[in-house]
Amino acid sequence: MVTLHLTSSESDGAFFVYLEDIDPQGVVRYITEGQLRGIHRKLAETAPSYWTGLPYRTFKRADAAPLPRGEFVTLTFGLQPTSALFRAGHRIRVALAGADRDTFTRIPAVGTPVWQVGRGGIHASAILLPVVH
């Protein structure tokens, strides 16, 4: 589960989070990812008809809302489920991106959005990973 607290210079955007494993030699391996469009950040007030284990949203037009430019918002979404072993000496990296040109339409279509990602205090972003020892 990812919780991003951020500001954006744009009223909409695509937010991609990648979880990666970095070995001691610096080789990066993709583990999983999650994504959310900024206007769809509102969580549903009703429960889904089936349990997903992830934050639930309706994605209805009535629930969409532009990002307030320059103000912190909270984006909470899941990563694709997977299982991975992070070996001793490896590092976990969380990478953020605003586009995935091979798969998704660019949002916004033009321009270069500027984000400020909260990293501490009341705007601390976080990632929650289940751990099995």
Image (cartoon, helix red, strand yellow):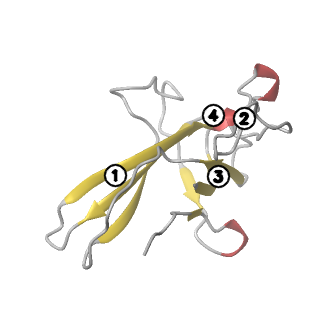
Residue closest to the eye, 51 or 46: 51
**Helix, strand or loop status at disc 4:** loop
> In terms of secondary structure, where does tag 1 sit?
strand
Residue 101 percent coordinates (x, y): 36, 28
Q: Earlier in the sequence, mark 1 or mark 3?
A: 3
Q: Earlier in the sequence, mark 3 or mark 4?
A: 3
User: What residue sits right under mark 2 in the picture?
Assistant: 57
Residue at 26% x, 78% y is 88
Residue type of the residue flagged with mark 1: Ile
For label 3, the residue is 7
- Lateral position of residue 35 relative to residue 6, left or right: left
What is the residue that sits farthest to the bottom in this orientation? Answer: 89
Kindly identify the residue that appears in the image at 80 percent across and 29 percent down.
Answer: 63
Q: Which residue is mark 1?
A: 31
- In space, the residues marked 1 and 3 are separated at their CA atoms by 26 Å
For numbered disc 2, what is the local secondary structure? loop
Q: Which residue lies under the disc numbered 4?
A: 12
Q: Nearer the viewer, mark 1 or mark 3?
A: 1
- Mark 2 or 3 closer to N-term? 3
Out of 40 and 65, give the one closest to the viewer: 40
